[in-house]
Amino acid sequence: MDKDKDYDYEDMAENDYECECEFSGYCPLLEEVMTPHLHKLCKTSADHRRSFLKYAMQRGVHNEKVKRSFSDQQIETMKSAEEADRVVKEIKQQGHKLDDNPSEGLGDTIEKALKKFGITQEKIENVIGSKGCGCSERKKWFNKIFSYKKNKDQEDEE
């Protein structure tokens, strides 16, 4: 197969082109490294061969205009990922960070949610005017009943 040759991938896909590669490895038609499994599929399955050819067309193999378009899409995806990384870095610089102390259960989650709104055990105790509002006990109870950790028995069964 000539790498510089213009292939008519649509015609090849429609007319059940037969794979000419003798072995797995680099396929100059698809410009892909074909594993032994993929090579076998290409040799034996017209449906897979058509899929490979259509994917090659999408990627613009042997067609510089389409290839550039495919590359532009990849560049846009990379730019989006870089933007997301920049935003995460900026958030970290502002002092926000991932929770170093993950919730063990629903009780921890409720406590963290209330704390975000400024509702803490100390404030509740100040409002009701006594020590011990029962928050800690409720938190433990919710954590035990609605635990985020798998049960030891469930782990052993898996």
Image (cartoon, rainbow, N blue to C red):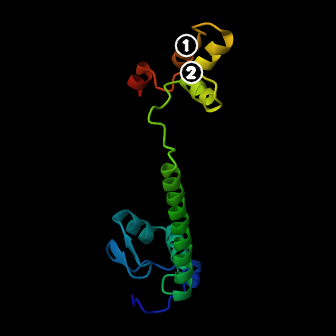
Kindly identify the amino acid type of the residue bearing the numbered disc 2.
Gly
**Residue 16 visible, this orientation:** no
| 87 is higher (above) or lower (below) than 116 | below
Q: Nearer the viewer, residue 9 or 58?
A: 58
Residues packed near mark 1 inside 10 Å, few (<14), some (14 to 19) or many (20 plus): some
Residues packed near mark 2 inside 10 Å, few (<14), some (14 to 19) or many (20 plus): many
**Which quadrant of the structure image shows residue 21?**
bottom left
Tell me the distance, in whole angstroms, between the alpha carbons under discs 2 and 1. Answer: 7 Å
> Picture coordinates of residue 23 (x, y %)?
31, 74
Residue at image point 41% right, 25% down: 155
Q: Earlier in the sequence, mark 2 or mark 1?
A: 2
> Picture coordinates of residue 3 (x, y %)?
40, 89
Q: Nearer the viewer, residue 130 or 153?
A: 130
Residue at image point 45% right, 31% down: 101
Q: What element carries label 1?
A: helix
**Which quadrant of the structure image shows residue 145?**
top right
85 lies left or right of 158: right
On residue 107, the disc is 2
> Picture coordinates of residue 36 (x, y %)?
34, 65
Residue lying at the far bottom of the rendered structure? 5
Kindly identify the amino acid type of the residue bearing the numbered disc 1.
Trp
**Residue 124 visible, this orientation:** yes
Which residue is the site of mark 1? 141
Residue lying at the far right of the rendered structure? 127
Question: Pointer 2 and pointer 1: residues touching (CB < 8 Å)?
Answer: yes
